[in-house]
Image (cartoon, rainbow, N blue to C red):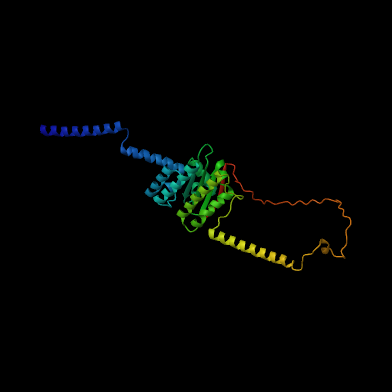
Amino acid sequence: MKKYRFLFSALLFSLFSAFAFSQGLTNEGGSSQPDAVTAQSERLAEEGDLLGTSDSVSSSSDSETFSTQVLYSNFFDLAGLFTQEEVDDFVNAGFEIEQKYNFPVYVVIVSDYKSYGCGIIEDFSEYFFEKNNLGMGEEKTGLLLALSMNDRDYDIMAHGDRGHYAFTDFGKNKLADQFKPYFRNDDWYSGLLEYYNFIDYMLSAADEGYPVDVDTWEEPREPKDWFIAELVIFAIAMIITLISVGVETSKLNNVSLADDAEDYIRSEDVRITHRDSKFIRETKSVTHIDKGSSGGGTSVNSRGYSHSSGKF
């Protein structure tokens, strides 16, 4: 009996020693794997609270999408509209523009901006921009496109002096014209590619001193249409020239050369022996040119943001 008690006591001692040893390793390592997972979950929860919406925290797929946005920080698909491969394309497009022009561009997509407690989408854009500390430099310069899918709302928002210079009121409308035709057909991917492509053009034009605006914009024409238009103008000019030459030539048919200059004077003509010109009065005519009510530029609100919003 004593033998069995000894074996039982030895077994308990071994188990207790193994348990104590494992606990010692855990404490010396700093944190166990469950503790690390908990810490990361708390960090993601804090970042999720910064974004402030139920779109980013619900299911496992939402968590994967959210963690991608935290990593990239320039494309926020909180509505889960795109695949990971498509998100990568947009992220790369945004980074290329930022590296090329030193100007950040952002996109945020939500199901409903009203779930953030905002009455209009412009307020949501400003809220999201500030809550996530977006923008570059002291002025927080940048451009944000906000899309709200439920009611198909969009807002293009610029911040900072350079943002307002490069993206005028007129320019923002032209930028929206690039993606709205695609969005209306639910072609989100092609629409956003056009968004990035036209931003590249607008920033390039602004760096050259000609931002897209009322007095600098020319509607692009297809090469075929341009050639046909030039050909028609040339043909009309040739026809008018031929008609004019024909008319003037017909007036010279009854004219013949004379031997002396006196032969050109008819005998019944009145001979003028004295000519004199006297200045009587001066008449001045002034014509006012109406330049219209739209002078271009950018309208900036009291909080330093400029917007262009609508439906798609």
Q: What is the count of numbered marks?
A: 0
Left or right for 186, reference 172? left
Q: Nearer the viewer, residue 239 or 96?
A: 239
Residue at the farthest right position = 273
134 sits left or right of 299 in the view: left
Q: Is residue 53 visible?
A: no
Q: Quadrant of the N terminus?
A: top left
The answer to which image quadrant residue 302 occupies is top right
215 vs 308, nearest the viewer: 215
Residue 61 seen anywhere in this rendered image of the structure: yes
Q: Residue furthest front?
A: 259
Instruction: Give percent across and percent down for residue 99.
Output: 47, 42
Is 122 displayed left or right of 41 in the figure? Answer: right
Residue 274 location (% of width, % of height): 89, 55
Residue 35 in the image: above or below residue 64: above
Q: Nearer the viewer, residue 143 or 3?
A: 143
How far across and how far down the image is residue 286, in percent? 76, 51
**140 or 41, which is in the foreground?**
140
Relative to 269, say whether 25 is above or below. above
Q: Position of residue 270 (x, y in %)?
A: 88, 62
